[in-house]
Image (tube, grey):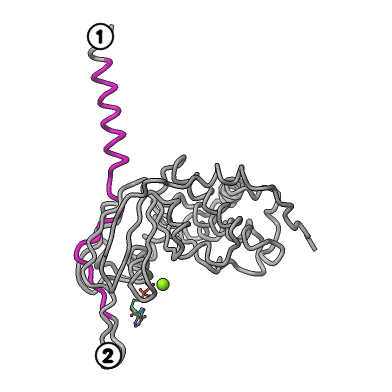
Amino acid sequence: MISVTELEAKEKRTDDDLEQRVAQPVIQLSHVHKVYYMGDVEVHALRGITLTVKKGEFVAIMGASGSGKSTTMNIIGCLDRPTKGTYILDGQDVSELSRDERADIRNQKIGFVFQGFNLLARTSALENVELPMLYSNNNTADRHQRALKALSEVGLSGREQSHPNQLSGGQQQRVAIARALVNQPALILADEPTGNLDSRTSVEVMEIFQRLNRDDHITLILVTHEHDIAEYASRVIVFKDGKIKNDYLVTNRRDAAEELKLLPPIIEDDDDE
Ligand code: ADP
Ligand code: MG
């Protein structure tokens, strides 16, 4: 028989394990610089960024235009490399990887959501969501299954066959989120995801991000210039002139699900023609 103290010890170990997993860093940027060369002109876009983001964090990146937000997102998303400094993603040093190696990492570990949705126009919602799996998963039935599940997670069951021009902006962004989710990434990066959406639809999109973050512990990094959108995150990082100017935890975090309950319901334009 197992004693109470043993049980307690066991439970504590499980708690410690959990805490360690939750506290694991997903992103470690150390003294990252980025210099763009345009002919004779050097643009020093990042001037020593040191930043750790742990598993399960929801980070909003803010800062004036030209402060280095997109450059940082491109490096974090393995679309570009630092000129100097190191980047460790999910325990792996990716600072020096080749273009092809970075493409593999992106496909395995990162989901992207953009301001302009970036969906294929002549392609159904379902096929758009299946796209990231074409490189990694050859099993058609499994691909379908996972795409259907991702679409249902963003509230789009029943719209699988709709093309982007048959969907509202909010619905298109939800397809894009489903596409970002479908490879079960360690990290979702969103650059101004609510930039083209009205305020109610923005809250709906933030509700999805908060739910994915809370329930599935997906790490999220979101660029926004709107303070009220940043307040849905748990942490805000402010860039200025290629450096981090401020980094703080959000104290009165907004809860998108609660806010949606208070908003009057809308009838979505479901015109299928
Ligand atoms: P933000 O996203 O905060 O507006 P960026 O990261 O896009 O800022 O840009 C930071 C600086 O780097 C700016 O001065 C911008 O003009 C410059 N920059 C960004 N991308 C390039 C590029 N591909 N070539 C040259 N300069 C660039
Ligand atoms: Mg930008």
- Residue at point 24%, 65% (across, down): 49
- Write the start and end of the magenta stretch as one range: 7-35
- Residue at point 26%, 17% (across, down): 8
Q: Nearer the viewer, residue 194 or 173?
A: 194
Closer to us: mark 1 or mark 2? 2
Q: Is mark 1 within 8 Å of ligand 1?
A: no
Where residue 81 sits in the image (x, y, percent)?
29, 71
Q: Is residue 51 above or below residue 46?
A: above
Q: Is residue 99 left or right of residue 145?
A: left
Residue type pointed to by label 2: Val
> Ligand 1 falls in which quarter?
bottom left
Where residue 113 sits in the image (x, y, percent)?
49, 61
Where residue 155 sits in the image (x, y, percent)?
62, 47
Give the residue number, with chain letter if any, for mark 1: 3
Q: Secondary structure at mark 1?
A: loop
Is 31 colored magenta in this rendering? yes
- Residue at point 63%, 63% (across, down): 169
Q: Is residue 85 left or right of residue 14?
A: left
Residue type pointed to by label 1: Ser
Q: Is residue 265 above or below residue 223?
A: above
Q: Is residue 10 above or below residue 199?
A: above
Where residue 174 sits in the image (x, y, percent)?
58, 56
Q: Secondary structure at mark 2?
A: strand
Q: Is mark 2 within 8 Å of ligand 1?
A: no
